Image (cartoon, rainbow, N blue to C red):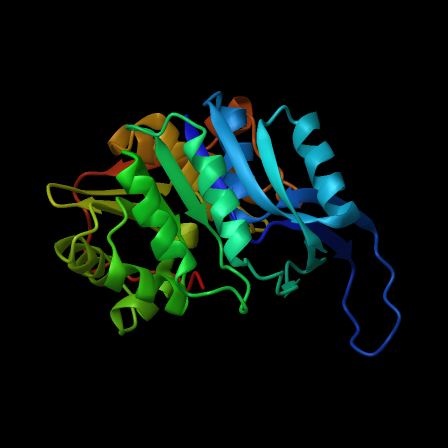
């Protein structure tokens, strides 16, 4: 069982149009609407992969009811902790030339009573040796202590904890506690270690620095260059044999989900990169099928070219 916690879920609307004209009326060609938030996406990918998952999220209003219905339709077990605040809507605008513009609402704060309910919902599940995934950025008004508190709570119950966050939220977390796994992307990893990462060697060294500081494993997504997984005993790098064209929104969430579900080893990384790359070609934040994922050839590089330059995946 993999439990996901999404403090800041969303309804993700992807708008496809020929060209975005600022200051003018724009006509949309097609619209894709998906349940969203990083933890929600992780649960959606886990369900598609056949892994057991339980999604815990926070929100209210008609948008909260819509999100619950959407998760029911996808047969994802979940619990929405109802608040007075509606769930946010995120917009992704995709132009015909491939240019993407994202507009994300900030979301609602998590108060003390909601945090208590979160802990109760987490602890109602069997946690020992199961994974709890804390994914996404809390709203700006949410206390910076929420993630550290949830990590410590879950680990005290015997769970393994994975965190996908960024910026000051992740930096503060790592100062106060050590999750078992973190999943930054290339830009987030650069921010975390304080220097620009432009090649594989720098990415590996940055991951090793974090592992040496007490995190057991770092899974770093590198956009079109694939992903690396680093722990104290190994470095594994996997990449698609050909670049997939499309929209990478949600691809990192799928990478994390499949890596956890498939066993956190080299084969798991290969599977995770397959599923992540396959999602790029799909509309909105749709989750691929096994058939779609298996069409992607992924190279598991045992002899890593550490000087290889990375594309800007920010």
Where is the C terminus found, in terms of image quarters? bottom left
Q: Residue furthest bottom?
A: 23
Toward the viewer: 288 or 292?
A: 288
Q: Is residue 186 above or below residue 267?
A: below
Task: Please state the total of marks drawn on the protein image.
Answer: 0
Residue 127, image quadrant:
top left
Give the image location of residue 186, x and y in percent: 36, 60
Q: Is residue 74 left or right of residue 56?
A: right
Q: Residue at x 76, y 68 (%)?
A: 20
Q: Residue at x 27, y 33 (%)?
A: 158
Give the image location of residue 249, x and y in percent: 56, 51
Q: Is residue 60 left or right of residue 273?
A: right
Residue 74, image quadrant:
top right
Q: Is residue 82 visible?
A: yes
Where is the N terminus found, in terms of image quarters? top left
Q: Is residue 113 above or below residue 286?
A: below
Q: Residue at x 33, y 45 (%)?
A: 153
Q: Is residue 107 left or right of residue 235?
A: right
Give the image location of residue 85, x and y in percent: 70, 56
Q: Residue at x 21, y 46 (%)?
A: 230
Residue 64, image quadrant:
top right
Toward the viewer: 132 or 35?
A: 132
Q: Is residue 182 visible?
A: no
Give the image location of residue 36, x and y in percent: 62, 46
Toward the viewer: 22 or 170?
A: 170
């Amino acid at each position: 069982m993999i439990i996901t916690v999404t403090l800041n879920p969303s309804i993700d609307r992807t708008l496809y149009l020929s060209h975005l004209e600022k200051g003018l009326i724009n006509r949309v060609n097609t619209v894709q609407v998906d349940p969203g938030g990083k933890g929600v996406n992780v649960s959606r990918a886990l369900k598609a992969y056949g892994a057991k998952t339980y999604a815990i999220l926070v929100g209210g209003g008609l948008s909260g009811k819509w999100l619950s219905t959407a998760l029911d339709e996808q047969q994802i077990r979940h619990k929405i902790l109802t608040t007075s605040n509606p769930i946010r809507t995120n917009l992704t605008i995709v132009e015909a030339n491939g240019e993407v513009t994202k507009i994300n609402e900030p979301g609602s704060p998590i108060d003390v009573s909601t945090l208590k309910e979160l802990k109760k919902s987490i602890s109602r599940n069997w946690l020992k040796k199961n994974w709890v995934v804390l994914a996404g950025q809390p709203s700006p008004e949410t206390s910076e202590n929420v993630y550290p508190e949830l990590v410590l709570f879950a680990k005290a119950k015997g769970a393994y904890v994975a965190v996908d966050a960024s910026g000051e939220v992740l930096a503060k977390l790592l100062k106060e506690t050590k999750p078992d796994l973190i999943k930054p992307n290339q830009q987030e990893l650069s921010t975390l270690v304080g220097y620009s990462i432009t090649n594989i060697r720098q990415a590996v060294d940055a991951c090793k620095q974090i592992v040496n500081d007490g995190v057991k494993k770092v899974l770093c997504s590198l956009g079109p260059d694939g992903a690396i997984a680093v722990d104290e005993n190994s470095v594994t790098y996997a990449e698609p044999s050909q670049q997939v064209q499309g929209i990478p929104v949600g691809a990192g969430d799928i990478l994390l989900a499949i890596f956890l579900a498939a066993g956190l080893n080299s084969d798991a990384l290969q599977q995770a990169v397959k599923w992540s790359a396959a999602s790029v070609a799909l509309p909105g934040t749709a989750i691929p099928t096994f058939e779609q994922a298996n069409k992607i050839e992924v190279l598991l590089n045992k002899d890593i070219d550490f000087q290889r330059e990375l594309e800007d995946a920010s």
